[in-house]
Structures are given as C-alpha cells and as structure tokens.
Image (cartoon, rainbow, N blue to C red):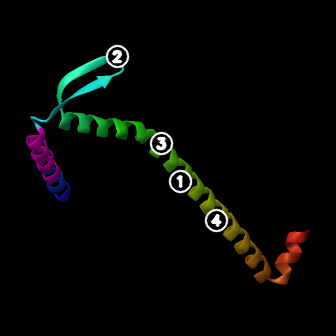
Amino acid sequence: MIGLIIFIVIAVLIAVFTGFNIRNVCDVNVIFHTFHNVPVFITIIVSFVAGIVVALPFSFGKGKSIAAKKIDKIKAKAAKDALKNAESIDKKAPAENRMTEKK
C-alpha cells in the first residue's frame, strides 16, 4: 500500500514538472542529427534514464563481489568453529575412547 502511495506522489510530481515546462523547448544535438523544439522535461527525463541504464551493470557487479566476500567470511568462520568444536570434543573424550581411536 505504501508503495502505491509513493508511486502516485512521484507521478503527480512528474506531471506538475511536465506542466510547468511544456513550452520550454530546446534543440538537442545527437552526433549527426539535431532534434528541434524538444521540451526540456523530455531532455531531462531521457538523460536521467540513460544514466540509470549506464550505471546499472556496475551496481550489479559490485553487489556480487561484496556478496562473494561475505560468503567466504562465513565459510571461513564455520570451518574455524568446526575445528574448535572437534578439538574441544577430543579433549573431553574419556581416556579409553582415545585409546581405541589410536588402534
């Protein structure tokens, strides 16, 4: 429900921004072509979306490396704990159990 409210608020803000800037136009040059009389809000929104598209692969790559480091830490800690448990069990074992294990 809260997500829907946030979506509606953002949509209203975009609509208000669009309404105020509908007549504010500019020319946009893209390499060899010029687009004439493009509303400024379209230029801003397209630039924003292009930035997200360019940055998205970098954010996924960083997340995987951080997750891999966390997994390695957890595995190392689990192995260390298992070794400590094995040593403590071995120390607590009765002498006759140790004798049978050596044979």
Q: Which residues are magenta?
A: 9-21
Q: Label 3 amino acid?
A: Phe
Q: Is 87 left or right of 46, judged from the image as shown? A: right
Q: Are marks 2 and 4 in contact (CB under 8 Å)?
A: no
Residue that carries the numbered disc 4 in the rendered image: 78
Residue at point 68%, 64% (across, down): 79
Mark 4 or 3, nearer chain start: 3
Q: Nearer the viewer, mark 1 or mark 2?
A: 2
Q: Are marks 4 and 3 in contact (CB under 8 Å)?
A: no
Residue that carries the numbered disc 2 in the rendered image: 32
Identify the secondary structure beneath mark 3: helix
Residue at point 14%, 47% (across, down): 11
Mark 2 or 4, nearer chain start: 2
Residue that carries the numbered disc 3 in the rendered image: 58
Determine the CA span between mark 2 and mark 4: 59 Å
- The C terminus, quarter of image: bottom right
The verdict on residue 88 being magenta is no
Q: Position of residue 88 (x, y in %)?
A: 74, 78
For residue 21, which quarter of the picture?
top left
Q: Position of residue 75 (x, y in %)?
A: 63, 60
Identify the secondary structure beneath mark 2: loop
